[in-house]
Image (cartoon, helix red, strand yellow):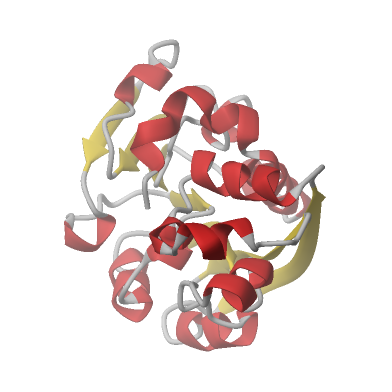
Amino acid sequence: MNFDKYYDVYEKNSFAQKKVAENLFSFMKENEIFKEKIATIFEIGCGTGIFTRLYRELIPESKLILNDIFNVEDFFKELKNFQFIKGNIENLEIPKVDLIVSSSVFQWIKNLDELMKNISNKTDNLCFSTYIFGNLIEIKNHFSVSLNYLKAEELENILKKYFQDIKFQKETIKLNFENPMDVLKHLKYTGVTGFQKSSITKIKSFKDKTLTYEIAYFICKK
């Protein structure tokens, strides 16, 4: 992941990530998450705040704890009553809060089972989106590069160990570009860079003008 090098262009290119954040927000509203009392909320992998600003509008008085592996605190100068914790969530002490959220992050986690166990010890409510099996299939097929994406049902089985009430929905988002190089630029500017280790010939022979995102949205309660 090379996310921190392209902060200045990330939000201009994060078409799918914005849509995913909006859909997670809508899923949470549909399930009346924000009608409950939320005094404290912890967001894992806040990035530049695309998702943060959506839900913050509905809970402006809640104490907000933001986490990211990079130094992104400057993106949140206008927010009040928030704390920033830098670091890899797999190595951090998770704060005890009313709600934990995360958008477009958990696909990067190496030991998801252990993280979910730790999260469940700190909150009764978890809402998140993540990319699942079949994500960026065009890149996998051409470059043989991919994260180890889980199926939504595999994620559900992990979550069942730690949460009683689990709701999820799946979605496919297809982005169309003018040419194959625009596809690769989009990935570069949104932090996906594994394909760049390929040869120039391999990169130039990439022919897809469509990019497929496979997403799952989860709401988990104890």
- Is residue 54 among what the camera can see? no
- The residue at 38%/30% (across/down) is 63
Image coordinates for residue 7, horizontal then vertical, percent: 43, 28
Q: Quadrant of residue 94?
A: bottom left
- The residue at 73%/61% (across/down) is 207
Q: Choose between 176 and 38: the one closer to the eye.
A: 176
Q: In this picture, is 145 found above or below 53?
A: below
Image coordinates for residue 127, horizontal then vertical, percent: 55, 57
The answer to whether 188 appears left or right of 209 in the picture is left
Q: In this picture, is 41 found above or below 54?
A: below
Q: Choose between 187 and 86: the one closer to the eye.
A: 187
Point out the residue furthest to the front here.
201
- The residue at 63%/27% (across/down) is 12
Image coordinates for residue 104, horizontal then vertical, percent: 53, 54
Image coordinates for residue 108, horizontal then vertical, percent: 40, 63
The answer to whether 31 appears left or right of 143 in the picture is right
Q: Choose between 78 and 13: the one closer to the eye.
A: 13
- The residue at 48%/53% (across/down) is 192
Q: In this picture, is 168 found above or below 106?
A: below
